[in-house]
Image (tube, rainbow, N blue to C red):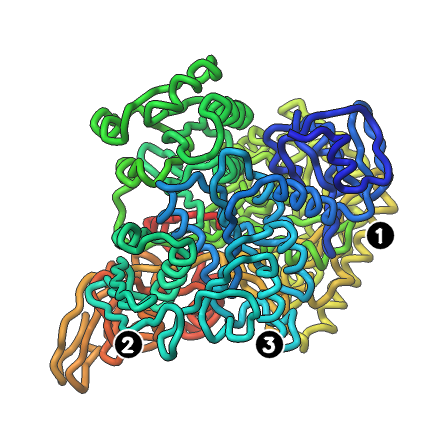
Amino acid sequence: MYSTAEIGRIVGARSIAGGEREIAHLLYDSRKIQQPGNSLFFAIKTPHNDGHRYIAEAYQKGVRAFVVSEKVILDEAVILEVADTLGALQTLAAHHRSRFHLPVIGITGSNGKTIVKEWLNQLLENDYSIVRSPKSFNSQIGVPLSVWEINAGHTLGIFEAGISHRGEMEKLERIIQPTIGVITNLGEAHSEGFTSREEKLREKLALFRPCKLVVGPKKLLARLDQPTLTWSMDEEADLRISSVRTTGGRTTIRAVHREKAISLDIPFSDEAAVQNAITCLCVLLAMALDPDDFVPRFLNLHPVDMRLQLHHAINNCLLINDSYSADLTSLKIALHFLDQQSSGRSRTVILSDFVETGKAETSLYKEIAQLLKTYGIRKVIAIGGQAGPVLESWLPSVAVQRFSSTEEFVKQFRSSQFAGEIILLKGARRFGFEAIAALFEQKLHGTVLQINLTALAHNLRAYQEILQPSTRIMAMVKAFSYGSGGAEIASVLQFHNTAFLGVAYADEGIELVKAGITLPIMVMNPEPASYGAIVEHSLQPVLYSLPLLRDFEEFVKTQGLTQYPVHIEVETGMNRLGFPPDKIGEVAGYLAASSTLRMQSLFSHLAASEEAGQDAFTQQQASRFREAAAVMEKTLSYPFLRHIANSAAIVRHPHLQMDMVRLGIGLYGIEPDAEAKLSLEPVATLRSTIAQIKEVEAGESVSYNRKGVVHRRSLIATVRIGYADGYSRRFSNGSGKMWVRGRLAPVIGTICMDMTMLDVTDIEGVKEGDDVILFGKELPVQDVAAWAGTIPYEIMTAVSQRVKRVYYYE
């Protein structure tokens, strides 16, 4: 631990207020506070946010030590004032790193950094106590937080460094202070921050200034003055790759190093995996390890999935599978994700012993126990001999079950012991928790809709960055969040400063409330039959006619309630629902006289905000709305929110942002304006697998009604998806296409209820079991919608509920 006085000296604080505190944990996100008593909060400023805004929240959660760059006064808190809070974080981490004299591998490159880091950990974890970057923490903030985790028990560090602009690597080099440098490759990622490829390479190589040896492709290290260990497939290098042969998903790499032949087998066949394995081999050679000892380990490498996945599991449970690593930092990340997604469910953690952490066993499990207590875990299943006894003694109010091995747990497993809870599966790789994950898995067919919750949060931030500071966001989660899932999506939005949620019908809102969502929820289409449920679950209805207004007020009176929140819709040109402008004066008078209802917001719908040719009409709608709002403001004695902008209008008509905007399809990664440059990321990926491949002779037909006729000998793949899953029959007979092995394969014949056939004749290497993408990053849903003559909304919302949703956090 460091004292706040010591930290103040290290970071050069210009003033120190408050007393003295001991600090063990650093944080910058007020939503992820886990151990506030000995945490130090850095109020970091970025181009689009300011950490000083969240100091009050952190203080409320128990944090009593802060690094700030503005004047802050808090009772009983230590305040360290500096010129640059991010710089102070980096300076503190660099000082901490300098206290430890252990070998450190620093990895950079455009791609493969995380894979190489994780594979090196897999190859060396039995020989070293390793501290490494969690997940892909390689940024200006992520690197110092990673390096802070070094302690006296560690014997090897592995950290990755990513940059996107000039000058950033110098800061990361001072923090990591690598002894061995690794560059994986040089691609196009983040190239916009550099004037040329040469400049980008020069900036990345800046990481290696303190290194005794640098590893990488010869073509990237040819001009480096420092000692290198290079590899190449086509020229002489320290490691000369003589052949690469792939058969049946397995690759044999033959190489020569110092006249000694090396044969390496890996359980992968893709080119990226081969290059990453070669990089790992070079690192081990650079560490002067005997190839005969470590080469056999390469065959046991497993895929690296940096995503936290949320699955619907047996007995209405949710399962977070993070079963390939066991360290404190990744546990904190996983527990935060569990907290975000729990929505009122009872919380269970199944964890293995934590090995090779560099910490003393008792203090390690005491810290784990504190984390579990902070996150309200109700049941712990400890597998292995170390964790259980300590957790039992430190968590007296938690049900702790102990099993000596994964095999013992599997043998005694009873599905009836788990119901309606959220379960985090967190184990070291050696414990083989995939056997436990299989016990909880719902047995559904191989078609899945994958929901990237990280992309969702990214898209939300992209819109937040272009909003006025005072403008709030209502996120539209109607229609099961555009097919992506209600409660899971709402749980993320609830953690990212969303003000309201919008649903179409009361039952959608009720499901969210039952799932533990606490954000206010606006119901756009209330029905008289739903009034009771609306009031019971504190939903806020939209009222769009005088009969509806009077009826709902009468109902609320019978419940003995006052000041019940409602929203008023104005008709300005959509001609769907809403009070006509000439009735707004009457509505305003009615609400002013009512003690039963209180208007939360006044809003309207834009009919064509995405179309430049309709901009004049959009402005006409806005003018009508402003006139209606002025009448309300004049009549009512209390404030209310005004909103008219949808996803497209947020970008195209920023002057219409007003008090709140309604963010819909843009949240899910669909740019409603073709000219928009928000760099949104697709949230949903619909994928399936090939069930069977067969050869069909020329002249034969495929599927019902014989409308799909082949004119040559063809290879036909049957995919496990049909119109019952939401894949429309409009895609039949070549109208639709799917992404198979990096190419588009056309649909042939009529789409069946549960199956669709593709012509894969011209795609090399297709085999049964191959992954097929129907829409996602590789195949934009906008393109798919165009083939069907419709819009992305319809494609996304059509995905059947029988298709399994898998949620993940990267």
Identify the image quadrant of residue 789.
Answer: bottom left
Residue 733 marker: 2
Going from the N terminus, do you reach mark 3 or mark 2 first? 3
What's under tag 1, amino acid-wise?
Ala
Left or right of residue 722, residue 768 in this image: left
**On the picture, is 160 further left or further right than 234?**
right
* Nearest the eye: 533 or 577: 533
Q: Is residue 45 above or below residue 154?
A: below
Residue 198: assigned label: 3
- Report the mark closest to the observer, 1 or 3: 3
Marks 3/2 in contact by CB < 8 Å: the verdict is no
Distance from Cα at disc 1 to Cα at disc 3:
59 Å
Crowd rating for badge 3 (residues with CA inside 10 Å; few <14, some 14–19, many 20+): few
Q: Residue furthest front?
A: 259
Viewer-closest of 37 and 539: 37
Mark 1 / mark 3, whichever is N-terminal: 3
Which mark is in front, 3 or 2? 3
